[in-house]
Image: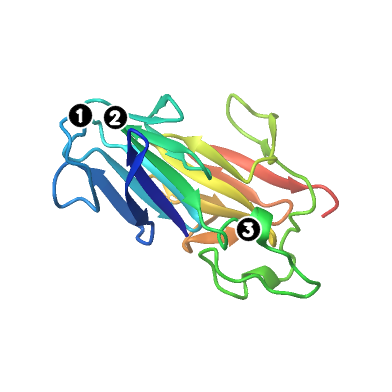
Amino acid sequence: MGKLVVSLDGVVIKEVQITKDKTTLGRRPYNDIVIDNLAVSGEHAVLQMVGADVFIEDLNSTNGTYINGKAIKKQLLSNNDVVEVGKYKIKYLLEDGSDYEKTMILKPGATPSGFGMPSSFGALPGAASAAMPATIKVLTGAAAGREVSLTKVVTTVGKPGVQVASITKRPSGYVFAHVEGAARPTVNGAPLTAESVALRSGDVIELAGTQMQFIQAGA
């Protein structure tokens, strides 16, 4: 799980654990994180947890939401990102047990647990191994033929405001999850009904009217 450290002029004011699917931030007293300052809108931003990932979205605030000095509308938070709201700085920190890229060691035959998925997830037959490099190839639309290497821990695909999904590299393989949009993306023609699904080489993803194929070397 991650946590937020709220500070003003270098002085830590509060720490908030992110445990809910949605955590609201703003000046009004009903927010989960209340910042009583006129530079902060009544309903300023919302943090949304998708599996082990946390996204922050600005709620059309008056003065905007910034991450590491850049204005954002919606963005995935990474460890040590600094969110700026008015004069307040909110640092996002992954706790030791959550930073699986650094702390998790898998023994042969071991089954990873947690990370927002069933404990048997890593043992699914045919699940792609994260040790193998993978790419997404666009099959339809203006970008047909383009290939994107999945080198980051999290890669987002789709059209913001229409339909967005994420592909997350985990010790057990690559995981596909719905992030934004009323319609669910499909994998091999079947709508994504679970929170996330393991990707296998050759799987065809469709979202925002575009088809893409997940390809993994050596699979």
Would you identify the image quadrant in which residue 181 lies?
A: top left
Taking depth in this image into account, of 63 and 176 the one nearest to the observer is: 63
Q: CA distance from mark 1 to mark 2?
A: 8 Å
Q: Amino acid at mark 1?
A: Ala
Would you identify the image quadrant in which residue 161 lies?
A: top left
- Viewport quadrant of the C terminus: bottom right
Q: Position of residue 2 (x, y in %)?
A: 46, 55
Would you identify the image quadrant in which residue 16 lies?
A: bottom left
Q: Position of residue 163 (x, y in %)?
A: 43, 41
Q: Which residue has dot 2 on it?
A: 87
Q: Position of residue 165 (x, y in %)?
A: 50, 45
Q: CA distance from mark 1 to mark 3?
A: 36 Å
Numbered label attached to residue 100? 3
| Residue 31 visible in the picture | yes
- Residue at 37 percent across and 31 percent down: it is 73
Q: Is residue 41 above or below residue 177?
A: above
**Pointers 1 and 2 in contact (C-beta within 8 Å):** yes
Q: CA distance from mark 2 to mark 3?
A: 32 Å
Q: Is residue 169 above or below residue 155?
A: below
Q: Earlier in the sequence, mark 1 or mark 3?
A: 1
Q: In the drawing, does residue 133 fall left or right of residue 50?
A: right
- Residue at 53 percent across and 59 percent down: it is 196
Q: Earlier in the sequence, mark 2 or mark 3?
A: 2
Q: Residues within 10 Å of mark 2 (few under 14, many from 20)?
A: few
Of marks 1 and 3, the one in the foreground: 1
The secondary structure type at the circle numbered 1 is loop
Of marks 2 and 3, the one in the foreground: 2
Q: Earlier in the sequence, mark 1 or mark 2?
A: 1
Q: Which residue has dot 1 on it?
A: 39
| Residue 182 visible in the picture | no
